[in-house]
Image (spheres, helix red, strand yellow):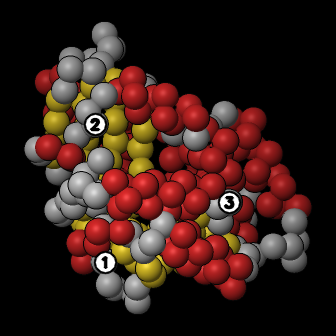
Amino acid sequence: MAGHSKFANIKHKKEKMDAKRAKIFTKFGKELAVAVSLGGPDPSSNPRLKDTIRKAKANNMPNDNIDRAIKKAAGDKGGVTFENVVYEGFGPGGVAVYVEALTDNKTRTVANVRSAFNKGEGNMGVSGSVSFQFDNIGQIIVLKSDVITEEDLMMMALEAGASDFAAEEEGYEITTDPSDFDAVLEALQQANIEVFEAEVIMKPKMYTKLTDPNHIKGMNKTLALLEEDDDVQDVYHNWEE
């Protein structure tokens, strides 16, 4: 895979992730709560919970945090019910923006998302207005180490169902179809391969460049507001930063 499909700098990515650690834990805390509400607190009989735990661990959520989230959700009978929602829109300069949220109040969430677009001089679109500009893929990032060679890691990933494997100076990017993501991640974890990051993402098919300083300022403002919103789980865009 070429260009934007790869991580450009692991150190920069790690610093960014560390800054967003609390957000990541909140995100998976909600996903664990949803999984428990749908299938109960026992991962052995709740496949969705089992998969969510695996993904949370792959993104470095501590076991204590995971256990607390599950126990809280299990004891919250008749409590808050979260719903998955997606919003699509355009940032300044026509940048495509795809927002995934998990909310207990859609009225609040849509108002906040619309405000983020408006304040950045963009606008919300209708369902399907930008989703066609993205591919839904599984992405697993593994740092280089002495535990396994590049060739062995590539063979392991491909045999488990990965669709592509890319090597860079600091690590590897493993790409999967969403339906194969869990199997590939589980294979790596069972082999004690330390995963740096693992998620199913929306990958842009093409990117949009911004040259107008006002457009860049507006885009940064929209993204900052969306990232700060507790209801927003993930934000994807095709801005070539």
Contact between marks 3 and 1 (CB within 8 A): the answer is no
In terms of sequence position, does the residue under pointer 3 or pointer 1 come before the other? Answer: 1
The kind of residue on which mark 2 rests is Phe
Residue 85 placement (x, y as % from top left): 55, 78
Residue that mark 3 sits on: 230
Residue that mark 1 sits on: 130
Q: CA distance from mark 1 to mark 2?
A: 23 Å
In terms of sequence position, does the residue under pointer 2 or pointer 3 come before the other? Answer: 2
Q: Residue furthest left?
A: 2
Q: Is residue 236 left or right of residue 102?
A: left
Query: Can you say which quadrant of the picture contains the N terminus?
Result: top left
Which residue is at a point 68% across and 60% down the rendered structure image?
Answer: 230
The kind of residue on which mark 3 rests is Asp
Q: Can residue 203 be seen by looking at this rendering?
A: no
Q: Is residue 56 left or right of residue 132?
A: right
The kind of residue on which mark 1 rests is Val
**Image height of 70 relative to 88, above or below:** above
